Amino acid sequence: TIAAQPLSAPASNTTPDSNGGTQPGAAATPIPASSPSGNPDTSSNLPAPETGSDSPNSTAASSGPVIATIPIIRRVSGIPVIEVTFNGRKFPMMLDTGASATVITSKMLSTLGIRPHDKILVSTPSDRRVTMDLARVDTVQVEGLSVSNLEVGVAPALEIGLLGQNFFGGYDLIIRGNQIEFHSRG
């Protein structure tokens, strides 16, 4: 997880906290990291494999009931890829548990016909002070789950987008072999 600031805002001095975020009061827009190849580097952020039943109606010990069960259509470097609808158009997206924000590709931006409204500076493990466009999507949906006015980063080096915490952060997730369960917080 990294922090980024809009270029139009004055820079603030933020320091990482023990949870990988920034200290309270920091004015930062989080954007996920990527590796030098342009693919997300989240291998150390993936949750431990689940054991037990793969029943879609099962719940984790500390989670509430299953709200949605999303099929995994494939994996990229072990990261699950699911189908996500942006403004009525479907795209494959990596569900990146280490990404604090959703990031789309330049091709997705063009297909959606939206324009960036700002730029942000991003620091990743491999690069510092990289400029990334910032855009807003009217609706983002996965099965029955929906978020309106979602701010997304635009990463030209990515070949597939990242669905981040600004979409699914309000849910507990269980990533299974062929599906992802979204649970209400218990």
Image (cartoon, rainbow, N blue to C red):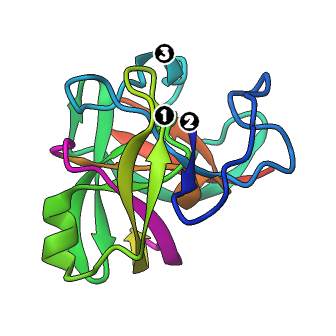
Residue at image position (44%, 29%) is 128
Badge 1 element: loop
Query: Residue 166: where, in percent of width, then height?
Result: 57, 57
When the figure is inspected, residue 174 is found, relative to residue 9, above or below; the finding is above
Q: Residues within 10 Å of mark 2 (few under 14, many from 20)?
A: many
When the figure is inspected, residue 107 is found, relative to residue 149, above or below; the finding is above
Give amino acid for label 2: Ile
Residue stretch in magenta: 143-159
- Locate residue 86: give its quadrant: bottom left
Q: CA distance from mark 1 to mark 3?
A: 18 Å
- Locate residue 14: give its quadrant: top right
In the picture, the quarter occupied by the N terminus is top right
Which residue is situated farthest in the right direction here?
24
Badge 2 element: strand
Query: Which residue does the numbered mark 1 point to in the structure image?
Result: 123
Q: Which label belongs to residue 43?
A: none
Residue at image position (55%, 66%) is 8
Foreground: disc 3 or disc 2: 2
Query: Residue 81: where, in percent of width, then height?
Result: 27, 43
Q: Residues within 10 Å of mark 1 (few under 14, many from 20)?
A: many
Give amino acid for label 3: Ser
When the figure is inspected, residue 80 is found, relative to residue 182, above or below; the finding is above
Query: Which residue does the numbered mark 3 point to in the structure image?
Result: 44
Q: CA distance from mark 2 to mark 1?
A: 6 Å
Q: Which label belongs to residue 2?
A: 2
| Residue nearer the viewer, 86 or 128 | 128
Q: Residues within 10 Å of mark 3 (few under 14, many from 20)?
A: few
Give yes or no for residue 145 being in the magenta stretch.
yes
